[in-house]
């Protein structure tokens, strides 16, 4: 399996996700679930085939991590739809997944079998996969925040706020687990759990930003719109943690976490 075959799997998955989104709007829940799940199976099969072909987890480059993010976004959308039957969530998750798939199609990267010694730790794969799932859940929470701020007419319902908060709770829980896996990886690869590397520093900033949102939402007299803006700001910090640090002068040649193609 090579990167050249990605377009075929991606198009098939996108068509299935789009069909699921259309079915959701037509209130055909079972069909929406089946189409979306089928798209996830197709996309995940490509990741597995790449894993076998590369003889390593496809997690080394930014393009490879975008594969997982493109997978987990519709999965998060399907989880929300299955629980709360929001018709539009599958459309939004499909659009976001399409963006990341297009980036990978228009900006292909070199995918070699080579892994630097530090990435050969058994903690590397669970750390990145758990983090990508956390990012997808927090991305879904951000979509909810944008919807409530700019598209929702009237005051958000209790259920809508509950969805948003639950996505943050679960996303932050997975982020915390990912950080713990990362600490174990760092200990195994470099001999210490934490070193305040630029990537680690921004990971801590992002973690505290979401924790601040949770605590602010629990305050009796919090301002709803401010809390939603806090959630959007936290997601911007998350993007900085994920890929923005690659462009920081402090990370150039110094950060052991900077992705390389």
Image: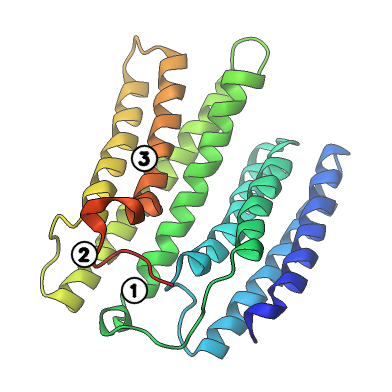
Q: Is residue 163 above or below residue 261?
A: above
Residue in the picture at 68% in, 13% down: 153
Report the residue marked by disc 2: 183
- Circle 1 Cα neighbour tier, 10 Å, few/some/many (<14 / 14–19 / ≥20): many
Q: Which label belongs to residue 237?
A: 3
Report the residue marked by disc 1: 124
Label 3: which secondary element: helix
**Quadrant (top left, top right, bottom left, bottom right) of the C terminus:** bottom left
**48 relative position to 246: left or right:** right
Label 2: which secondary element: helix
Q: Are marks 2 and 1 in contact (CB under 8 Å)?
A: no
N-terminal of the two: label 2 or label 3? 2
Residue in the picture at 46% in, 64% down: 62
Q: Position of residue 8 (x, y in %)?
A: 77, 73
**Which of the colour schemes (rainbow, by chain, secondary structure, one colour) is used?**
rainbow
- Circle 2 Cα neighbour tier, 10 Å, few/some/many (<14 / 14–19 / ≥20): some
Observer able to see residue 97: yes
Q: Is label 3 or label 1 in front?
A: 3
Q: Are marks 3 and 1 in contact (CB under 8 Å)?
A: no
Residue in the picture at 65% in, 59% down: 101
Q: Find the distance from the CA under tag 2 to the CA under tag 1.
A: 10 Å
Label 1: which secondary element: helix
Q: Find the distance from the CA under tag 2 to the CA under tag 3.
A: 20 Å
Residue 177: image quadrant is: bottom left
Q: Is residue 257 above or below residue 46?
A: above
Q: Is residue 65 above or below residue 153?
A: below
**23 relative position to 184: left or right:** right
Q: Find the distance from the CA under tag 3 to the CA under tag 1.
A: 22 Å
């Amino acid at each position: 399996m090579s990167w050249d075959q990605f377009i075929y799997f991606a198009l098939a998955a996108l068509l299935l996700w789009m069909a699921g989104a259309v079915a959701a709007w037509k209130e055909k829940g079972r069909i929406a679930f089946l189409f979306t799940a089928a798209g996830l199976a197709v996309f995940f099969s490509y990741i597995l085939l790449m894993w076998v072909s590369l003889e390593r987890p496809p997690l080394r480059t930014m393009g490879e991590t975008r594969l997982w993010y493109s997978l987990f976004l519709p999965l998060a959308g399907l989880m929300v739809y299955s629980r709360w039957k929001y018709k539009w969530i599958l459309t939004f998750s499909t659009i976001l997944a399409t963006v990341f798939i297009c980036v990978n199609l228009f900006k292909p990267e070199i995918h070699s079998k080579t892994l630097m010694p530090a990435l050969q730790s058994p903690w590397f794969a669970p750390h990145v996969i758990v983090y990508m799932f956390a990012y997808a859940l927090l991305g879904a929470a951000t979509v909810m925040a944008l919807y409530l701020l700019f598209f929702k007419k009237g005051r958000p319902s209790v259920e809508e706020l509950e969805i948003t908060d639950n996505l943050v709770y679960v996303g932050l829980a997975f982020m915390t687990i990912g950080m713990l896996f990362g600490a174990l990886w760092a200990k195994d690869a470099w001999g210490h759990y934490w070193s305040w590397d630029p990537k680690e520093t921004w990971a801590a900033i992002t973690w505290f930003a979401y924790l601040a949102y949770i605590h602010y939402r629990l305050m009796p007299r919090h301002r709803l719109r401010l809390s939603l803006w806090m959630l959007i700001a936290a997601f911007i910090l998350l993007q900085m943690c994920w890929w923005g640090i690659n462009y920081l002068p402090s990370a150039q040649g110094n950060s052991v976490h900077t992705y390389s193609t």
